[in-house]
Amino acid sequence: MRQFGGNVAVDVEHVEIPRGKITALIGPNGAGKTTFFNLLTGFDRPNAGTWTFDGSDLAGVPSYKVARRGMVRTFQLTKSLGLLSVLENMRLGATKQLGERFLPSLMPFLWSKREAEITGKAMELLARFKLDAKAPDYAASLSGGQRKLLEMARALMSDPTLVMLDEPMAGVNPALTQSLLGHILGLKDSGMTVLFVEHDMHMVQTIADWVIVMAEGKVVAEGYPRAVMSDQAVIDAYLGAHHDTDLGTLTGQLAIAEDVGVSDELIGQIEEELEEQEDQEAGK
Ligand SMILES: Nc1ncnc2c1ncn2[C@@H]1O[C@H](COP(=O)(O)OP(=O)(O)OP(=O)(O)O)[C@@H](O)[C@H]1O
């Protein structure tokens, strides 16, 4: 549970992330998704609560240790360091850098071997994300979408078992969307567990195996994508965010149905009704 003053941002009683699957965390703006991510990854501290990852307790563990245990995340606003090169950004993602510890620094041969390994791994990952040609460039010179790819690639430097992505599609141009989706599916194929926050319902429908819905700090629904998208609690949660939409009109209902990502059949039905209504009005 996390409270900011009198405002309860996150109040989750129980939730589980299925291992080896892709889970989407959705919910209207201000639902507490980012705060929940921050708590799980040690970037924020809860007022109360415990949780475990791979059988070990993680509550209160600071972010750098959380990453060492195999749980890494990216941010909604990318955190690449613009004035470092793309390669240097990648190298920062490596954990257990021997060179930072005292004893190994007395043994330069060990140190340089490890450095070479890190660079090798960074270049391999950059090639996978088609960023290898950019390795020497400042991260600041990358496009928004490329920065998202860099963040994802950097997260993989520590060989995580759980990768958490905060709005991976936000600000990514359509040309890169497909390749980002492919990379996320690739994480699952290589055995990782993925948890992502996303507003793009198309993406949720396309790649998520499991969906968790938050509203006003609580988990209001969870399940398979199709089932969750037509769940009344989910539709209500989004309706709460659409209090300015006139629900009495078919156009209003259509806007919400599309936003919530209900089935194409249902959207088709509403569209048909809307057309009929328009025809009737035109005929009058
Ligand atoms: N550092 C903070 N100080 C005070 N209030 C905060 C802080 N961080 C978040 N909140 C509040 O907590 C609630 C949940 O916010 P959060 O950013 O987690 O929602 P979200 O679901 O990630 O929203 P979005 O989809 O817009 O990113 C909001 O009411 C927000 O105003």
Image (spheres, grey):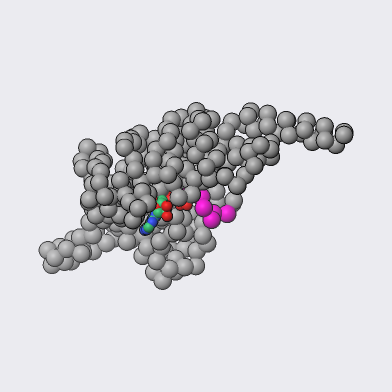
Q: Answer yes or no: is residue 280 visible.
A: yes
Q: How many marks overall?
A: 0
Quarter assignment of residue 101: bottom left
Q: Residue sitting at 66 percent across and 37 percent down? A: 248
Q: Is residue 93 left or right of residue 204?
A: left
Q: In the rendered image of this protein, does residue 34 appear above or below residue 204?
A: below
Q: Nearer the viewer, residue 275 or 106?
A: 275
Q: Main secondary structure of the magenta part?
A: loop
Q: Which residues are magenta?
A: 167-173
Say which of 256 and 129 sits in front. 256
Q: Is residue 27 magenta?
A: no
Residue 220, given in percent of the width and then of the height, sits at 42, 36
Question: Quarter of the image containing the C terminus?
Answer: top right
In the displayed structure, 174 sits above or below 282; it is: below
Visible residue check, residue 186: no
Q: Residue at x 45, y 50 (%)?
A: 30
Q: Quadrant of residue 280?
A: top right
The residue at the far bottom in this view is 83
Going 57% across and 33% down the picture, which residue do you hit?
A: 262
Residue 88 falls left or right of residue 98: right
Residue 241 horizontal/vertical position (percent): 53, 45
Percent coordinates x, y for residue 20 in the rendering:
36, 35
Image x and y of residue 96, in percent: 22, 56
Give the residue displayed 40% in from the left and 66% down from the top: 81
Closer to the camera, 26 or 246? 246
Whether 199 is drawn above or below 88: the answer is above
Residue most toward the front? 6
